[in-house]
Each structure stands twice: as C-alpha cells, then as structure tokens.
Image (cartoon, rainbow, N blue to C red):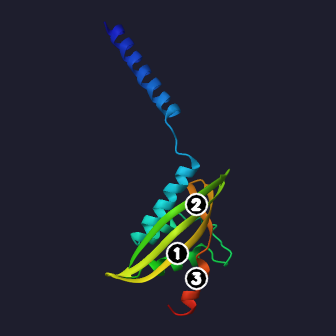
Amino acid sequence: MRGRGATWAGIILAIIAAGGIAWWILYPRPSAEDRIRALITQLQRGVEDKAPDRVMSLISDDYRDDFRLRRKDLSILVLGALRTRADLAVAIHQSRIQVRGREATATLEGEASVSEGREAVGRYFGTVTLLLRREPGGWKVVSTRGWQKRVLQGFEAGE
C-alpha cells in the first residue's frame, strides 16, 4: 500500500511541476514597449503624487542630457518641483516608442499643469523625449530632451 501512495504522490508532483514549467514557458511576457509604457506611467504618477524617490528610481545613475544636467542635478530639480504646495497634473496625449535592442526612445506629447486650489498657476504644452536603456534593474531613463530650456529659463528668471 505504501508503494502505491508514494507512486501517486510522485505522479501528482510531476503533474504540478509540468504545469508550472508550461506556465512559465507559455505565459506572455510584457514586451519592451509595454515595460516602457509602464515606466512612463510610473513617472507620471510619481510626479502627480509628489514622490521624488519614485521618480528618481526610474532615472539611471548614468543620466546626462544636452544641458549638461546629471542625475544629481536632476534630483535637485525634481525635489524642488515636487515640494511645492501646488497640485501637479500630467496628461500624455500621444507617445511613440522605438526600441533598438537595449536602447529605446520615447517621444511624449502632452501637457503638465500646476494649480493652487481652483486657480491654474502654470501650464506647459509640448514634446519631451526620453532616451532609455535596459539596465539590470529594468528600463531606466538615461537622458531627456524638450523641457530643459523652458524650466531652466524659469529658474533664471526667478520663477
């Protein structure tokens, strides 16, 4: 009798193992584009929730852009922008993503608005380009274009 119980237990374990292996092999994995769209959504929510740590967790340690901003500089800008009492909203109307192996470009068209109570304080319409790279922890932003001139001019003007 004991032999039969052990045999059935072995068969059941083999079926469970085979099912687990089949699920792991056949389960659809998100594409690179899907993962990048998720990263963009996380960035958007991080800004709206005023969570600089979440925003910066999506930025590569190697970040550098055409305005010579590095990750540390960007961190200071993000922290300053998200510490405001104003409400921030980001709406992305269109995005185009091009993946080339371990690198990708995401071009985002949309708007960002700043409001205090019911009063709109500022609004930005435009295109922002994210340059991304697949790193060990997933996709990360390594550079951006399209927002720096307007934002940095605002800082220079004392806004």
Q: Is residue 2 left or right of residue 73?
A: left
**Residue type for callout 2:** Lys
Which numbered tag is attached to residue 72?
Answer: none
* Circle 1/circle 2 CB separation < 8 Å: no
Q: Would residue 136 be visible to someone looking at this image?
A: yes
x, y percent for residue 126: 56, 73
Return the disc, 2 or 3, that comes first in the chain's sequence.
2
Residue under label 1, please give it. 125
Rendered location of residue 152, percent (x, y): 58, 84
Categorize mark 3 by other alpha carbons within 10 Å: few (<14), some (14-19), many (20+). few
Which of the pair 127/10 is nearer the observer? 127
Vertical side of 87 occupied by 59: above or below: above
In this view, 36 is above or below 59: above
Q: Residues within 10 Å of mark 2 (few under 14, many from 20)?
A: many
Kindly state the secondary structure of the residue where label 3 is placed.
Answer: helix
Classify 3 as above or below 46.
above
Q: Which residue is mark 2?
A: 140
Residue furthest bottom in the image: 158
Disc 1 marks which amino acid?
Answer: Phe
**Amino acid marked by disc 3:** Arg
Asked if the residue at tag 1 contacts the one at tag 3, i.e. Cβ–Cβ closer than 8 Å, the answer is: no
Could you give the CA–CA distance between mark 2 and mark 3, rounded to whole angstroms? 24 Å
The residue carrying mark 3 is 150
Sequence-wise, which precedes: disc 3 or disc 1?
A: 1
> Can you say which quadrant of the picture contains the N terminus?
top left
